[in-house]
Amino acid sequence: MIQEKYKTIIDNLISATQSDKIQWGKTSRDSEYIVNVGQGSVTIDYSSNNDPFSSSFYEAVNFSIRNDIGEPIIRIYVQDEDAEYKYLKDFYDLVNNSYLKADKTINSMMDFLNNLK
Amino acid sequence: MSKTWKIIIFVLSFIIVLGLFLEISSGEKNKTWVLNGFTMFGTLLSLWGICLAYMQIHSVKETSEKIQSEVANSIKEINEFFSFSDISTTIERIREIHNYIIINKIELALLRMKDLKIQLINIHSNSKLGTYIDCDAFKLLIRDINLDISHIHDHLLRDKNVNLSMVNKHLETTSTSLEEIVSKIKNSKL
């Protein structure tokens, strides 16, 4: 269960990401993103085991709030069976899109192709 | 007070006391002038003794303050030298980690990265280097190295992926920042 104050932080991060007010970066783990927030930083990571057909297949999102030198202060780890998984996975996908500029790129492509007609 | 001034003041005070003595003793008919003379010159010499002792103490105090200041300066210079050598050692350590990563000795790289983190924290908290370091940017370097350590650790223990090119990039950025600090220190000494 995510505490209310951390949920508020996540909600604010979601709206800041949606409005491009914060820029996410990558860490040395390919699936992990990081952003500076005030004196600290926030990381979000998605992981799964490699075989989707395995009985032990799982997906998980790891959200961490870190201090000014990157030490984790709060760690929220949810697996696909947890109630908050979808909430954090949607947030992760939003961050991923924001970093890759996926929506912007696709929209600009569509605009370009529409102008060709 | 210079030696010449001391002699001048002594001679003047001697002449004044001698004058006073001659003035007092000229009217004396009995031999009390001898006692008066001893008393007056004795008092003059005692006063001079006290003055000389005071000046001596003052001079010892000044010398001691001068020595203290010289010692403080020497300690400052030694500390600066050690801070400077700390940064050079840290740059060397980064080169060492680069080499371990190139030859795929990740365990050794991890050990050295833990040392590197401690060295970076020491440099960051060294007040002597405060003027040469952009604190916020330096904290970000420590943060990235800290995350890299955690990712390499997870890679070794739980077989999680780690992007070694990104680790190398962070090491390179850290090395560049340290070289900049060295350059700033060198230029400020010129």
Image (cartoon, rainbow, N blue to C red):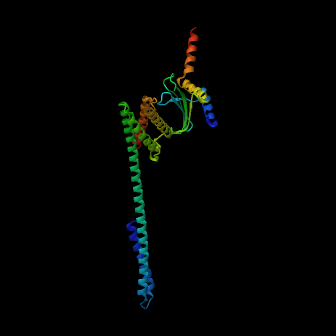
Quarter holding the C terminus of chain B is: top left
Quarter location, residue A74:
top right
Q: Residue lying farthest bottom?
A: B30
In the rendered view, tell whether residue A91 sits above or below residue B4.
above
Please state the horizontal and vertical placement of residue B180, each as a whole percent of the image: 42, 37
- In front of the other: B124 or A67: A67
Please state the horizontal and vertical placement of residue B130, each as a whole percent of the image: 47, 44
In the rendered view, tell whether residue A110 sits above or below residue A16.
above
Please state the horizontal and vertical placement of residue A48, each as a whole percent of the image: 51, 27
Quarter holding the N terminus of chain B is: bottom left
Using residue A67 as the reference point, say whether residue B28 is left or right of it. Answer: left
Q: How many marks?
A: 0
Let me know if residue B142 appears in the view: yes
Residue shown at the point (47%, 47%) measured from the top left: B127
- In front of the other: B74 or B163: B163
- In front of the other: B27 or A31: A31
- In front of the other: B67 or B55: B67
Residue shown at the point (42%, 30%) measured from the top left: B164
Quarter location, residue B129:
top left
Residue shown at the point (43%, 70%) measured from the top left: B54
Q: Residue lying farthest front?
A: A55
Using residue B184 as the reference point, say whether residue A13 is left or right of it. Answer: right
Let me know if residue A17 appears in the view: no
Please state the horizontal and vertical placement of residue B144, each as a whole percent of the image: 47, 35
